[in-house]
Amino acid sequence: MDPETFRALLTADGQALLTALREHDHADDLAVATRLRRTYDAGLVSAALGQARLRQRAVAKFGAADAHRMYFTPDGVEQATRATVAAHRAGRFRALGVGRLADLCGGVGGDAIALARAGIEVLAVDRDPLTCAVAGANAEALGLADRIEVRCADVTGIDPGPYDAVFVDPARRTGRGRTFDPEAYSPPLSWALTAARTVPFAAVKVAPGIPHEAVPKDAEAEWVSDRGDVKEAALWFGTEPGAVRATLLPSGATLRAAAMPQDPPPVRPVGRFLYEPDGAVIRAHLVAAVAAELGGGLIDPTIAYVTADEPRPTPYAAGYEIGDVLPFNLKRLKALLREREVGTLTVKKRGSAVEPEEVRRRVKPRGPNAATVFLTRVAGAPAMLIGQPLKGD
């Protein structure tokens, strides 16, 4: 879709089509397109059907209320920040006293929307004309045009000096797919870090797998998860240099350390309780902090499962009561589950080559009861831990 075709979606006919297609089942696209083309231009019908599909995909990130008012490109849906994560970051900027921010590599405007809703004036910059048109339309559709200025330009030509803060989300994809070379980002990570250091506050979005040794010493590193899934990492400037942070959404619980952790948690025998740290905690290398909070240790020096003798509530890990600690043996597991009439089996793994689907296929769980099995290593040896989630987790 080009900018001209997109602008047609903003006309009365385009809006009528989008409204009609809101609840459309896209399995029936051909018949619907044939019917609509009797009344509307064929190109407009095609564009509206494509936009309706993108809006349905975007619901997972933006929620239905916003997604069905917004506009998207295929790349925009794929690369946009989840609304909960964008709102968290906007809240941090607002708490720092930021009033004006340059959102460099703004995309379809997801971050700009969250920032504007937090009361921040935003300059959203992108170099793609269609993406800029979509971002501007989104600001209008959500009633935020007075707080969001969309500028179509190369971000490397923008002077961030007049702003309190910058946010940079470099594209991590090239024409050949995802790139893991920071200097192949667009713009390169080195440029983004330089821009970040020119203003009082900044955040630069990076891949969640960034090695800790690659984090600049003058940056705070934050990993963010949403409902247990790690969504992003960001390097913050002007906050707490050298600190690491794991933030869990939607609760907003934050675990931080003043410096990159050095000492690993102790290793000990499996106790009655097992805790599975959130992915953001693991990425931030803060498992030791969770182990200390729980009065526990690791079951293996290379596995991020924490064991303890007492149940303690924590927002940073899911807890389980363990009834069996056994050497890995699928035949034995099958017999035990059959004896206990387990039909609902949750299989988790860390440090095991066996896939959960393979386990379920081979043990054939049947019965009214439920159990969780962990395929892992205990003190270096393959093991099976069988238990139940703690109530409230």
Image: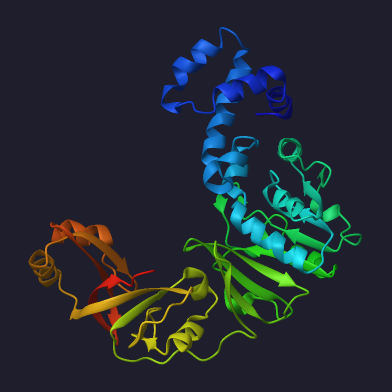
Q: Is residue 197 above or below residue 306?
A: above
- How far across and how far down the image is residue 392, in percent? 38, 69
- How far across and how far down the image is residue 349, in percent? 32, 69
Quarter-of-image position of residue 170: bottom right
Q: How is the image coloured?
A: rainbow
Q: Is residue 278 above or below residue 70?
A: below
Q: Nearer the viewer, residue 351 or 254?
A: 254
Quarter-of-image position of residue 76: top right
Q: Residue 171 vs residue 301: left or right?
A: right
Residue pictured at 82% horizontal, 47% vertical: 147
Q: Residue 95 vs residue 346: left or right?
A: right
Residue that sits furthest to the front in the current view: 392
Q: Is residue 17 above or below residue 352?
A: above
Residue pictured at 41% horizontal, 92% vertical: 266
Residue pictured at 31% horizontal, 67% vertical: 348
- How far across and how far down the image is residue 297, in percent? 39, 88
Numbered-mark total: 0
Quarter-of-image position of residue 149: top right
Residue that sits furthest to the right in the current view: 162
Image quadrant holding the N terminus, namely top right
Q: Is residue 105 visible?
A: no
Q: Is residue 240 visible?
A: yes
- How far across and how far down the image is residue 24, in percent? 48, 26
Image quadrant holding the C terminus, namely bottom left
Q: Is residue 181 above or below residue 266?
A: above
Q: Residue 80 vs residue 381: left or right?
A: right
